[in-house]
């Protein structure tokens, strides 16, 4: 019974993190420029990717509990987490700069690592019971 709990938490983390991040990116907030750089085509791609993860997380949250969609939604959630784990663990090697004053590193990179670790736990619990 741990798998649905951890999946819910992982999907909720995606939503809770990505709503303010997407808002900041779409509104071109000052803090976003420090962390993500100026508005560029690459940042536009990042907005699209983050928005896609947000929309999928919102769609999968209820779906993992509906009898008719439960199994498929849990496997889809696992696939989403695996994609996130790969790109989040790659960010320290592919990202430079964006460190606000007083921060030990880029906050997006640091947050990505923490979230990826939690998603790893979620995937491990799910696959152990699959």
Image: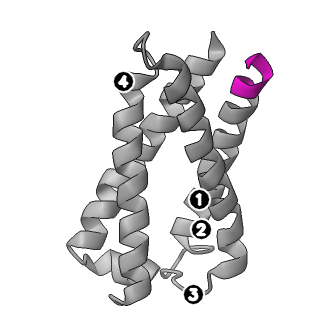
Q: How many residues crowd mark 4 within 10 Å: few (<14), some (14–19), many (20+)?
A: few
Q: Residue at the location (41% across, 41% down)?
A: 57
Q: Nearer the viewer, mark 4 or mark 2?
A: 4
Q: What residue is disc 3 on? A: 97
Q: What residue is disc 1 on? A: 112
User: Along the horizontal axis of the image, is 92 left or right of 69?
Assistant: right
- In three-dimensional space, the C-alpha distance between marks 4 and 3, rounded to whole angstroms, equals 38 Å
- In three-dimensional space, the C-alpha distance between marks 1 and 4, rounded to whole angstroms, equals 24 Å
User: Along the horizontal axis of the image, is 59 left or right of 78?
Assistant: left
As helix, strand or loop, the secondary structure at mark 1 comes to: helix
Q: How many residues crowd mark 2 within 10 Å: few (<14), some (14–19), many (20+)?
A: many
Question: Could you tell me which quadrant the C terminus lies in?
Answer: top right
Q: Residue at the location (30% across, 71% down)?
A: 25
In the drawing, what numbered circle is on residue 109?
2
Question: Do the numbered discs 3 and 2 sit on residues whose CB atoms are within 8 Å?
Answer: no
Question: Could you tell me which quadrant the N terminus lies in?
Answer: top right
Q: How many residues crowd mark 3 within 10 Å: few (<14), some (14–19), many (20+)?
A: few
Q: What residue is disc 4 on? A: 62
The magenta-colored residue range is 125-130
């Amino acid at each position: 019974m741990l798998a649905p709990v951890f999946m819910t938490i992982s999907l909720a983390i995606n939503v809770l993190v990505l709503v303010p991040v997407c808002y900041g990116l779409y509104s071109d907030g000052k803090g976003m420029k420090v962390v993500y750089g100026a508005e560029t085509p690459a940042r536009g791609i990042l907005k699209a990717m983050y928005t896609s993860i947000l929309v999928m997380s919102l769609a999968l949250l209820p779906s993992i509990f509906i009898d008719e969609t439960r199994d498929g939604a849990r496997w889809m959630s696992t696939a989403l987490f695996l994609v996130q784990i790969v790109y989040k663990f790659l960010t320290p090697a592919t990202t430079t700069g964006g460190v606000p004053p007083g921060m030990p590193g880029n906050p997006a990179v640091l947050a990505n690592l923490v979230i990826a670790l939690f998603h790893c736990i979620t995937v491990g619990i799910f696959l152990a019971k699959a």
